[in-house]
Image (tube, rainbow, N blue to C red):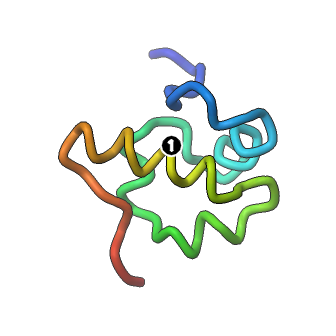
Amino acid sequence: MNDQPDLPPGIGNPATRAFTAAGYTRLEHFTRATEAELTSLHGVGPKALRIIREALETRGQTFKLTD
């Protein structure tokens, strides 16, 4: 099993560190979190969310819609 994060390129190091520290190491992990939950992570901003959103959309997936 690969322990390296499987995140889209371009989200930036602060957001990558925040995501991996919170356990979001693979793109499919983001389907169980709302955008609000992710925004609350230190280092995560609109650009990172946009990149993740677009990557999910290419797979026909989305962020979790509500809590």
Percent position of residue 4, x then y: 59, 20
Residue 9 occupies which quadrant of the picture? top right
User: Is 32 drawn above or below residue 34 in the view shown?
Assistant: above
Q: Between 56 and 33, which is closer to the camera in this rendering?
A: 56
Residue that numbered label 1 is attached to: 51
Number of marks in the rendered image: 1
Q: Residue at x 63, y 58 (%)?
A: 46
Percent position of residue 63, x then y: 37, 62
- Residue flagged by tag 1: what amino acid is it? Ile
Residue 32 occupies which quadrant of the picture? bottom left
Q: Residue at x 50, y 15 (%)?
A: 2
Report the side of 6 relative to 60 (left or right). right
Q: Residue at x 38, y 44 (%)?
A: 54
Residue 37 occupies which quadrant of the picture? bottom right
Q: List the single residue furthest toward the left.
A: 60
Q: List the single residue furthest toward the bottom.
A: 67
Q: Between 67 and 9, which is closer to the camera in this rendering?
A: 9
User: Is 67 drawn above or below residue 8 in the view shown?
Assistant: below
Report the side of 18 relative to 53 (left or right). right
Q: List the single residue furthest toward the top.
A: 2
Say few, some or many: other residues with alpha carbon within 10 Å of mark 1 (under 14 / 14 to 19 / 20 or more). Answer: some
Give the position of the C terminus as an image quadrant.
bottom left
User: Is 21 drawn above or below residue 16 in the view shown?
Assistant: below
Q: Residue at x 46, y 65 (%)?
A: 33
Badge 1 marks a residue whose secondary structure is helix
